[in-house]
Amino acid sequence: MISNFRLHTLGLSLLIGVAAVPAAHAQASISSAGSGSTEDRVTTLERISNAQSQLLQQLQQQLNDTQSDIDALRGEIQQNSYQLNQVVERQKQLYQQIDTLSSSGAAASATSSASSDNSQQASTTDQSASDAAGQVGTQTGDMNKDYNAAVDLVLKQNKPDEAMAALQAWVKKYPDSTYQPNANYWLGQLYYNKGQKDNAAYYFATVVKKYPKSPKSAEALLKIGTIMKDKNQLDKAKSVWQQVIQLYPNTPSAKVAQKALAE
């Protein structure tokens, strides 16, 4: 569309330049039209007038085409702006929903040591939650639908216990899904909100250990530092926060870890 606009602009410039030649010729013709018979002079003036009329029509058409291109560009810009605003608004809503699940302003995460310390307890809870998932009825066999249904139990229905059961079953049923880091992080957060911090640490540690390149990994590692602090294991908490800064520099989680260490 922009290329058409430039072509029309170039064409308009050329037409204006071309118009200057017939105009100058017309002036010369008018000047020379004083000689000869009256009929010859009238014929010459009519020819000049017709040429100028055709030129004006061409110029007007070029102007109309240019204005159409401008209107189309303006419409595209307005549409793109609206779509961008929609994306930004949706992202803002998602952040607000996630923030409501946090029981504190600082993010926390899990470490490998926490995973080994609490794996047995989490495994027992995992089995009971998986059994309960059969009663929830969220398993349809479709990976994406099952995941969305489990998350909706938290975000839309405010049923954290059923959400944990559904997520437990989902994690076992779809071990190769790219949503595994998110699902484990959700489980860690839900257990943390319930005060079951050992189980929470296990799932946060799972994110860090199995999916270190996931965007959730830095948040999960930060979370375990908070759990260590809650358990009054300050040396472990400091060690975890230092790992966050070292492994995930220049991230929001690293900034939170630096603040926690400073405190």
Image (cartoon, helix red, strand yellow):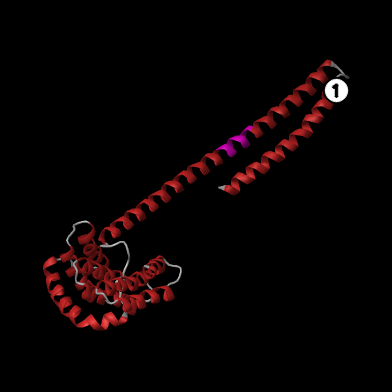
Q: Quadrant of residue 120?
A: bottom left
- CA neighbours of label 1 inside 10 A, class few (<14), some (14 to 19), many (20+): few
Q: In the displayed image of the protein, which residue is found farthest to the right?
A: 35
Q: From the viewer's side, name the closer residue of 180 and 98.
A: 98
Is residue 39 rendered magenta in the image?
A: no
Q: Is residue 226 left or right of residue 15?
A: left
Q: Is residue 110 left or right of residue 14?
A: left
Q: Residue 75: give x, y in percent of width and height.
A: 48, 42
Q: From the viewer's side, name the closer residue of 240 and 238.
A: 238
Q: Residue 47: give x, y in percent of width and height.
A: 76, 26
Is residue 62 rendered magenta in the image?
A: yes
- Residue at the spot of label 1: 31
* Residue at screen point 11% across, 68% down: 135
Main secondary structure type of the part rendered in magenta: helix
Residue 70 shows in the view:
yes
For the C terminus, the quadrant is: bottom left
